[in-house]
Amino acid sequence: MSISAASGYRASRTLPIWAEVRRQASRRRTQLALGFMVLLPLIILVAFEFDTGGPGDEDGGGGGGAFSSIADLGTSGGLNFALFCLAVSAGFLLVVVVALFFGDTVASEASWGSLRYLLAIPVPRARLLGVKLIVAAAYSVLAFLTLLGTALLIGTLRYGWGPLGSTIAAEIPPAEGLLRLLGILAYLLVTMLVVAGLAFLMSVLTDAALGAVGGAVMLWILSSILDQITALGAIRDFLPTHYTDAWRGLLSTPIQAEDLAKGAISAVCYATIFWGLAFYRFTRKDVTS
């Protein structure tokens, strides 16, 4: 005997994407995350204004390598200021923001006890995960764009509009420099797919949102530490963080695209595996919270 769905019921009408967008927009963590994307460039600008130079600045004794060179260019134009803001955020802040949006999705519903009620509406499990995945990705992109847009705006107002400086090639004209900057942003978003996949998988595995977010960040940090161990040799090439700095290839002329392609492929593969595991686990688990 087959059981038919109730009259008028359509799975595609349950948990509309815009309803989830509004729900997440009302969350304090969403507001704080986006607010800090606006605040960070302002903090960096103030830090630059109060910078009087260190003891080793004049003779180059301060060190710092490529990152230090990018910092030196930070006050030479709006594009360079935005580049510095992205560079200083890529190592940790953006990782935390992405982990927050993806790791707090399912786990927070479980911790509040509302997950089983959503499924009882009934929202199909795959649709629930799909909607939450799309909304988390949208807010992550919005956070990145907010950071870049704010940095470009205040950097241009303070330091003017000029070419994008490069530490490994000649200056890049402003129009092309803006495209390169957008390319860097896009590549950082792609590399963060690994964090998104990890956090989303852990959000399905645990009822503690903090555990999901913290676990994803800790695994990312662990991969970064292992990538610094040269004794690992070729094994490092398979670490998800190995190509995170490949965006610097967009500052060279011509663009060094080999590592960019490897990094993008690696991130997509890892994210696909993690998201696949998340869907497989969630569609088969007993939801009691």
Image (cartoon, rainbow, N blue to C red):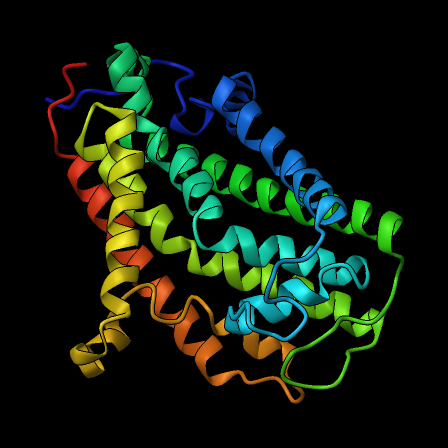
Quadrant (top left/top right/bottom left/bottom right) for the C terminus: top left
- Image coords of residue 145 (percent x, y): 65, 46
Question: Along the line of sight, which residue is nearer the eye, 189 or 46?
Answer: 46
Q: Is residue 154 above or below residue 193?
A: above
Q: Residue at x 52, y 26 (%)?
A: 30
Residue at (36% x, 33% y) in the render: 127
Name the one closer to the observer, 121 or 186.
186
Q: Depth check: 266 or 35 in front? A: 35
Residue 241 position within the rendered picture, expressed as x and y whole percent measured from the top left: 34, 64
- Residue 50 at x, y percent in the picture: 73, 44
In this orientation, does residue 234 appear?
yes
x and y percent of residue 72 in the render? 68, 66
Front residue of 249 and 166: 166
**Above or below — where is 68 with respect to 29?**
below
Quarter of the rendering containing residue 1: top left
Q: How many marks?
A: 0
At 74% from the left and 85% from the top, the residue drawn is 170
Q: 140 above or below 270?
A: above
Q: In the picture, residue 160 is in which quadrant?
A: bottom right
